[in-house]
Image: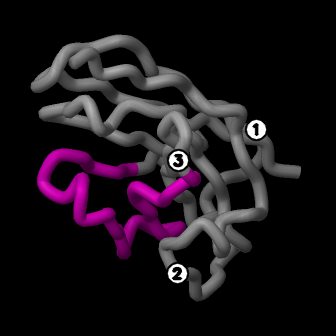
Amino acid sequence: QLELVESGGGLVYPGESLRLSCTASGSLPSYPIAWLRQAPGKERETVSCISAKSTRKDYDNSVKGRFTISRDNAKNMVFLQMDDLRAEDTGVYFCAAAVPYSDYRCTLTDFQHAWGPGTQVTVAE
């Protein structure tokens, strides 16, 4: 059974960077992975998704050009490099898996196979 744990969150100031990591126990290479976030008082939303072999990467318009998703299947890890952070990026960030080798959409609905507990990212105003 796949289990996911996020790390790398913290408190930063606007314009700074963070790198989030999602570490899997169990074999990760067959799973599409998404990064999602939930801001205070708002619904959970997808930020970025990556296919099992990294051939496809999707980004929400709000993070395009600032965030980069990547993965290292040999280490069972997925990363989210977040640059030029803004106050509106504040929230709890989760990684989640879709069904292996699925024809997924980069939406909350399609990433329900496994979830991590989340890591807090706070960008001070």
Characterize the local packing of mark 2: few (<14), some (14-19) or many (20 or more) Cα atoms within 10 angstroms: few
Residue beneath disc 1: 25
User: Which residue: 32% across, 64% down?
Assistant: 60
Lower sequence index among marks 1 and 3: 1
Given the image, on which type of amino acid does mark 1 rest? Ser
Label 1 to label 3: alpha-carbon separation: 29 Å
Q: Which percent across, then down, holds residue 9? A: 45, 21
Q: At numbered mark 1, what does the secondary structure look like: helix, strand or loop?
A: strand
The image's mark for residue 42 is: 3
> Residue reaching furthest right?
1
Tell me which residue sits at (40%, 66%) in the image. Answer: 54
Judge depth for marks 2 and 3 and give the one in front.
3
Instruction: Tell which of 95 and 39 is nearer to you.
Output: 39
Vertical comparison of 33 with 107: above or below:
above
Is 9 in the magenta?
no
In the displayed structure image, the side of residue 38 where residue 27 appears, left or right? right
Residue that mark 2 sits on: 105
Amino acid type indicated by mark 3: Lys
Q: Reading the chain from its start, which is encountered first: label 2 or label 1?
A: 1
